[in-house]
Amino acid sequence: MVIIDKDACIGCGACVGGCPVGALSLSDEGYSVCDGDTCIDCGSCVGTCPVSAITQ
């Protein structure tokens, strides 16, 4: 599962659109969250984040 730095996340949603299985969403607080049960650990979201808030 990916790790999202919620303090660095700007809530742009780029990773949400870049996830092929829909494991990412934006929280009510405005940062990305990952559903570990759905995530296939492909890393697609890592490259879509413009502020490098996501690591694998």
Image (cartoon, rainbow, N blue to C red):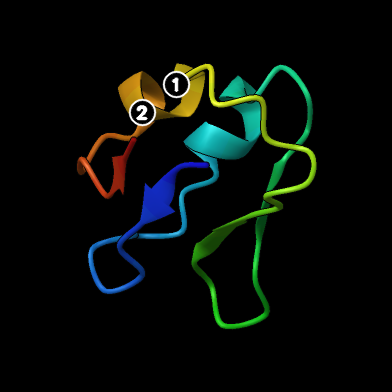
From the top left corner, tell me how far across and down residue 21 is, in percent: 78, 24
Viewer-proximal residue among 41 and 32: 41
Number of marks drawn: 2
Residue 21: image tag: none
Residue at position x 53%, y 72% in the image: 30
Mark 1, other Cα within 10 Å: few <14 / some 14–19 / many ≥20: some
Viewer-proximal residue among 20 and 36: 36
Judge left or right: residue 44 versus residue 47: right
Q: Secondary structure at mark 1?
A: loop
State if disc 2 and disc 1 touch (CB < 8 Å).
yes
Residue 50, above or below 13: above
Residue 55, above or below 6: above
Residue 6, above or below 4: below
From the top left corner, tell me how far across and down residue 25 is, in percent: 69, 52
Residue at position x 26%, y 74% in the image: 7
- Distance CA(mark 1)–CA(mark 2): 5 Å
Residue named by callout 2: 46
Viewer-proximal residue among 27 and 34: 34
From the top left corner, tell me how far across and down residue 33 is, in percent: 58, 60
Q: Secondary structure at mark 2?
A: helix
Residue named by callout 1: 43
From the top left corner, tell me how far across and down residue 37 is, in percent: 78, 46
Residue at position x 53%, y 17% in the image: 42
Mark 2 residue type: Val
Mark 1 residue type: Gly
- Find residue 56 and report its image quarter: top left
Residue at position x 39%, y 52% in the image: 3
Judge left or right: residue 43 versus residue 24: left
